[in-house]
Image (cartoon, rainbow, N blue to C red):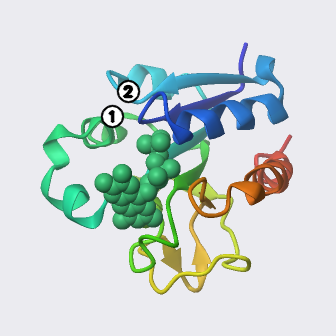
Amino acid sequence: MAQIGVFYGPEKGSVEKVAQKIAEIFGADRVELIPVKGCEASELARFDKLIFGVSTIGKTNWDTEHTANDWDVFATKLKDVNWKGKTTAIFGLGDQLTYPHHFGDAIGWVYERLEAQKANVVGFCSTEGYTFEESEGLRDGQFMGLPIDEDSQPDQTDVRISNWVNRLINEFGF
Ligand SMILES: Cc1cc2nc3c(=O)[nH]c(=O)nc-3n(C[C@H](O)[C@H](O)[C@H](O)COP(=O)(O)O)c2cc1C
């Protein structure tokens, strides 16, 4: 049975591509990929190790169109899960060149919701190698997950995913 649930959205774009790469590196038999769209709390309860994948879709959209967002609906299910003994991590797609003042904000949005449930979140990342002005995905100078920029730094994607997954193997206690 898969040990890690990767919950991601939206589908079909870069978030899904990164979710698939993460699964490949962990080993496909260890990972189940589950779109957040239509996902229920019972799906979350099945795993002790959970990875959440999101993209930042614009500060304005993110703040005002929450009800239309699959992630917003999914986030309401988090309270129905017993987070004791579970370990989680976040990755977030963004574009630091076009949105330097909101780079990867959604990482912070997801983190806040996991933190509210007292979930254990690992996989924080240094800002080294990224060029941006501000991000709501930061705490104490670190990203609260893995930022991936397929728009302006696609050449960095593979190495970033690989380094992060190798760290998670430790942080997840494998
Ligand atoms: C309308 C729109 C708004 C965006 N706003 C932001 C933003 O505020 N911050 C950011 O880092 N990236 C932003 N992006 C970039 C996306 O997060 C990035 O392209 C991501 O890879 C998209 O993932 P997807 O293909 O899975 O949808 C925006 C993209 C679009 C199309």
Name the residue nearer the viewer: 136 or 151: 151
The verdict on label 1 being within 8 Å of ligand 1 is no
- Mark 2 lies on residue: 41
Residue at the image point whose x is 66% and y is 78% from the top: 127
Q: Give the vertical position of 24 relative to 106 (above or below).
A: above
Q: In percent of the image, x 76 and y 56: which residue is there? A: 155
Q: Secondary structure at mark 2?
A: helix
- Residue 120 image-quadrant placement: bottom right
Residue at position x 20%, y 64% in the image: 60
Given the image, on which type of amino acid does mark 2 rest? Ala
Percent across and percent down for residue 93 are 52, 53
Q: Position of residue 131 (x, y in %)?
A: 61, 81
Mark toward the start of the polypeptide (1 vs 2)? 2
Name the amino acid, label 1.
Asp
Q: Are marks 1 and 2 in contact (CB under 8 Å)?
A: yes
Q: Which residue is mark 1?
A: 80
Q: Helix or strand or loop: what does disc 1 sit on?
A: helix
111 in relation to 100, above or below? above
